[in-house]
């Protein structure tokens, strides 16, 4: 097998592996801050994209909450976004789109110094809506 035929096969394998790694919103008890934000809400089916206008709140390196029109979305980035809990910021690499989507890559950057500490990728967004 040469490199030209191997590349598409590798890409297909990576995409199919990524597509099957959906993670539950919380396999164990969520942090207290998340539990308060989700109180009285029920989880819905995971969605791949949400509006870029959703308000973001960082809980820790492993959990980001987004609020949009009464819905709270739980985002647990693949592998976490190391440094967010210490005041780092996410810089999104997507331009010209009005959505935040699963698979979007974000740079983790210290805005005071301009130095990046790495990157992270969004997983599915779990919507929580008030019952009733």
Image (cartoon, rainbow, N blue to C red):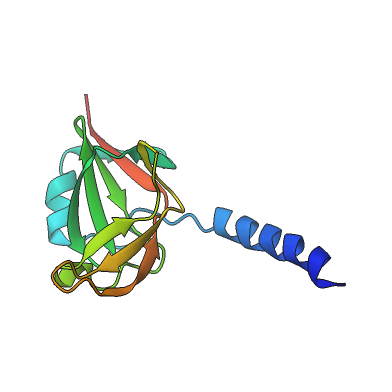
Residue situated furthest top in the rendering: 132
Q: Residue 125, position in %: x, y?
A: 36, 46
Name above or below for residue 80 compared with residue 44: below
Q: In this view, does 22 lie above or below 73?
A: below
Query: Where, by quadrant of the figure, is residue 1 drawn?
Result: bottom right
Vertically, is 38 above or below 16?
Answer: above
Evaluate whether residue 20 shows in this view: no
- The answer to which of 60 and 23 lies nearer the viewer is 60
Q: In this view, does 72 lie to the left or right of 16?
A: left
Farthest right residue in view: 1
Query: In terms of image quadrants, where is residue 62?
Result: bottom left
Residue 128 in the image: state x and y as whole percent. 27, 39
**Rendered position, 76 above or below 114:** above
Residue sitting at x 40%, y 49%: 94
Q: Position of residue 7 (x, y in %)?
A: 74, 65
Foreground residue, 60 or 31?
A: 60
Q: Position of residue 129 (x, y in %)?
A: 25, 34
Q: Which residue is drawn at 16% across and 38% down?
A: 40
């Amino acid at each position: 097998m040469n490199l030209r035929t191997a590349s598409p096969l590798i890409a297909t394998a990576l995409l199919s592996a990524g597509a099957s790694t959906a993670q539950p919103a919380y396999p164990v008890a969520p942090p207290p801050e998340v539990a308060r934000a989700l109180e009285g809400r029920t989880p819905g089916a995971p969605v791949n994209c949400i509006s870029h206008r959703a308000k973001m709140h960082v809980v820790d390196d492993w959990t980001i909450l987004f609020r949009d029109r009464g819905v709270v979305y739980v985002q647990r980035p693949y592998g976490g976004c190391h440094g967010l809990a210490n005041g780092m910021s996410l810089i999104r690499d997507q331009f010209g789109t009005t959505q935040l989507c699963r698979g979007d890559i974000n740079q983790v950057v210290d805005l005071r110094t301009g130095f990046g500490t790495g990157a992270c990728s969004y997983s599915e967004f779990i919507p929580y809506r008030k019952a009733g």
